[in-house]
Amino acid sequence: MSEWIFYAFAALAVAGALGMVLNVRNTVAGALSLVATMVSLGGIYVMLGAYLIGVLQILVYAGAIVVVFLFVVMLLNLREDGFASGRQWATKAVGATLGVAAAVGLIGLLPAHFPEAAALPEGFGGYRVVAALLFTDYVLAFEVSSLLLLSAMVGAVILARRSTD
Amino acid sequence: MVGEAVILSAILFAIGTVGALVRRNVIVVLMSIELMLNAVNLALVAFSRQWADPAGQMLVLMVIVVAAAEVAVGLGIVIALFRNRESLNVEDASLLKW
Amino acid sequence: MLEVVLKLLFIVLVVLAGMLPLITWVERKQSAVMQDRIGANRADLMGVTLLGLLHPMADVIKLFSKEDFVPAGANRILHLLAPVVAIVPAIITLAVIPYGGTYVFGASTLSLVVADVDWGILFVFAVGSIATYGAVMAGWSSNNNWSLLGSMRASAQMISYEVTMGLSIVGLFMVYETLQLPAMAAWQDDSFRLLGFVEHLGGVQLPAFLGWIRLPAWGIFLQPLGFVLFLTCIMAENKRPPFDAPEGESELVAGYHLEYSGMRFGLFYTAEFLEVPVIGCILTTLFFGGWAIPFLPQETIISFIGAGFGEGFATGVCLVLHVLSFLVKVALMIWLQMALRWTLPRFRYDQVMDLCWKVILPLSIANVFVTGAIILWVEAVIA
């Protein structure tokens, strides 16, 4: 049962990703199909025992990041974006070849059989376990990431501001 | 399920790579990079499940933070670029190219 | 079996069938009372008007019989999908709302919540963040500049208020020490002495009668600032007045659902109206003790009635009382939202964003700090 749910999520994720990359006409529809990928990845995270990450995936990626993408598309008022200039078969062929090579190479690196997954301890992936680790062993990374977010925020404001003076 | 999840992660990463290389719309390129980050997250969560070690999930949290920062700065650049060039085609942003 | 039936009954009957048509009637009557009018009373079925209660039915018949129009140049698929995306999150949220506690009947246990997940409140936030797509898809797919402006406003407003909505109740999580909604409600089934802390200040002797004053241990009394901030944020999330800049009739005609007609327009309206009781449920659970009855904890009720009528009967009575208490509180929260909606004029769009980032965000961060300091003090002095 749970395998089939996993495969359904996986198929939806791949379909959404392909929809985003192959949709050359309509950026908004592409972004919306990326949302399908994000949400189904959230489902897969929950199935893999990472409850908090699964919810954060939907909250941050689907709920905020893609909405910001859509906001920018609407702000710039792009209804169609098929670029007229040359079709560039060479670039596309090289890109597709590299992509397939990357997929085959990465999958080839995997062992044929994974060992049986370890038994999960109580509360694995819940917010208590993750937070306990985040504020002890990883507190430096946590603080640094807050600085990163602050600098990104300031940078974005300065970049997007209309220079009036 | 862990093995399948890692294979799915590889497939998504490859799709993201193709998108980032082939598409010329800056916004789609940024979204493809997001997709690649997501694929990495999936692999991290799968390995974290394999060894029942929450350290992988910690790394995912950091990746989410980096992705949010990347989107904020990246879209800021996109807006500035559109203001100056009236275009979202990456090939119109080739002023520094030799 | 009984459990499943009860849970389904709550969702389908109480909220969808009962609350929703009723709530449009309540809204009309409330606005009429506040504006010194009579309100809807004309729809009649063979002379019976039922105080205007037939109006919701007439509305639905009217909406269903109208043409379902898709404008030229619209993106057809997204245009048809948007109302569905708008209404689904409001319904799913109900899955994690506890409308009663946990009751033990002999060998079996009955827990009155559909999905008792460890991260219940995060589920509410995640589902709420998906609701943004309804407005975004509707506005973008309609091929209309008013709609586009409306959905831009909607997306910016909803993302911003999601951030502050989460931060404004962090203090509450610190007090309850859980994210699980049933556990939060059970935590509040208690009371505390309002001035009890004075005894720990040293040297101060409290008059006996002041020491007797007790308050229910509800979120509103423990986090009053958190309540005000959260109420503001969640009302802004719902995009109803005074935060209806995304649809503002006088500026954007009707905003993101301008190009919708018939029942698809009705679905957008339904989503907004349905969110009113859902918000009422969330507010009740977080800040008003959920199903708890003030000063009468579950054990007291069961032991008091159980002494005369037996344990099982007492538990059953307690269950009914708790569900009733929950519904009464939700009704009060709905009244509060209606009163606010008909009292305040619409904020200008820049005022909405200023309120979010320059007022609510700093205040909620300050709230987290103050709450943390008080918790540390309490743990050091009292425990």
Image (cartoon, coloured by chain):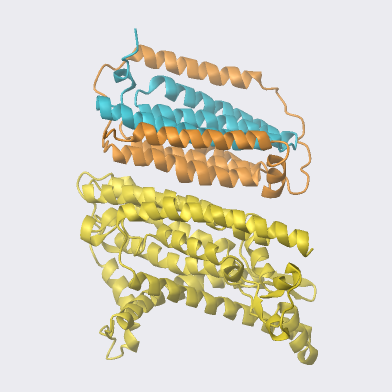
Residue A34 shown left or right of residue C39 in the figure: right
Quick one: which residue is furthest to the top in this view? Answer: B98
Residue A30 shown left or right of residue C200 in the figure: left
Front-lying residue, C309 or A157: A157
Q: What colour do you see for chain A?
A: orange
Residue A128, given in percent of the width and then of the height, sits at 70, 49
Residue C216 shown left or right of residue B11 in the figure: right
Front-lying residue, A50 or C368: C368
Q: Quadrant of the N terminus of chain C?
A: bottom right
Quick one: which residue is furthest to the left in this view? Answer: C72
At 24% from the left edge and 22% from the top edge, which residue is drawn? A84
Quick one: which residue is furthest to the front in this view? Answer: C203
Residue C186, given in percent of the width and then of the height, sits at 68, 69
Residue C291, given in percent of the width and then of the height, sits at 61, 74
Using the rendered view, name the quadrant where residue C105 is placed.
Answer: bottom right
Using the rendered view, name the quadrant where residue C56 is placed.
Answer: bottom left
User: Is residue A165 shown to the viewer in this render?
Assistant: yes
Q: Quadrant of the C terminus of chain C?
A: bottom right
User: Is residue A82 shown to the viewer in this render?
Assistant: no
Which chain appears cyan?
B
Residue B54 shown left or right of residue C8 in the figure: right
At 62% from the left edge and 66% from the top edge, which residue is drawn? C113
Residue C171, given in percent of the width and then of the height, sits at 60, 58
Front-lying residue, C370 or A100: C370
The answer to whether C30 is drawn above or below residue C174 in the figure is: below
At 61% from the left edge and 60% from the top edge, which residue is drawn? C172
Q: What colour do you see for chain C?
A: yellow
The answer to whether C276 is drawn above or below residue C163 in the figure is: below
Front-lying residue, C302 or C267: C302
